[in-house]
Image (cartoon, rainbow, N blue to C red):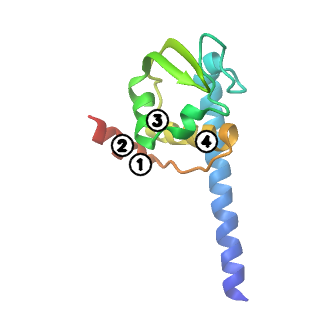
Amino acid sequence: MKTIGLLVATLVICNSAIAADTDSGKAVFERVCAACHLPSGEGIPGAFPPLAKSDYFRKATPAQLVKILSNGLNGPVTVNGQTLSSAMPPPEISDEEAAAVLNYVSVALNSGKANFTTEQIKKLKAAAK
């Protein structure tokens, strides 16, 4: 019985941590990303790609996503079959905020999982240099 109780407590704590991370990620998204990608993440057709239900986001590796947040993105990009050519400057966010916003976009906008950690962001940024 103690094992089951411990397992349930661990799951509750983990789910609370993920919820808190996606909540902070939502705040970063609303402050930094929503102006171009809209609060819904749907983007602006012909101008800014969607982050919600995005085949580009789902197919990208963690390293590719971190590179976009670190360096921005210029030039053509194809998302959900639509090719757009615009510029995204690198947002001025911390590694912790980068992990949180990537988790938010993954979970809330793409039905994915919260897999990003601050440590992972730091390692991927260091490897990209």
Q: Amino acid at mark 4?
A: Ser
Residue plotted at (59% across, 16% down):
48
The answer to whether 79 appears left or right of 11 in the picture is: left
Residue pictured at 54% horizontal, 32% vertical: 56
Residue 109: percent from the left, percent from the top?
68, 37
Answer few, some or many: residues within 10 Å of disc 3's Cα (few below 14, many 20 plus, some between 14 and 19): some
- Packing grade of label 4 (10 A; few <14, some 14-19, many >=20) is many
Q: Is residue 87 above or below residue 103?
A: above
State the mark number for residue 65: 3
Circles 1 and 2: CB distance less than 8 Å? Answer: yes
What is the spatial separation of the Cα atoms under label 1 and label 2, in whole angstroms?
6 Å
Please name the amino acid that badge 1 sits on. Gln
Position of the N terminus by quadrant: bottom right
Marks 4 and 1, how far apart in space? Answer: 15 Å
Q: Find residue 124 and name its label.
A: 2
> Left or right: where does residue 110 sit relative to residue 61?
right
Amino acid under disc 2: Leu
Q: Are marks 2 and 4 in contact (CB under 8 Å)?
A: no
Find the residue positioned furthest to the bottom. 1
Cα distance between the residues tagged 3 and 2: 10 Å
Q: Which residue is mark 1?
A: 120
The quarter of the picture where the C terminus appears is top left
Disc 2 element: helix
Name the spot of residue 36 as percent of width and height, x first: 61, 16
* Left or right position of 40 against 96: right
Q: Label 2 to label 4, Cα distance in Å? A: 18 Å
Q: Which residue is mark 4?
A: 106
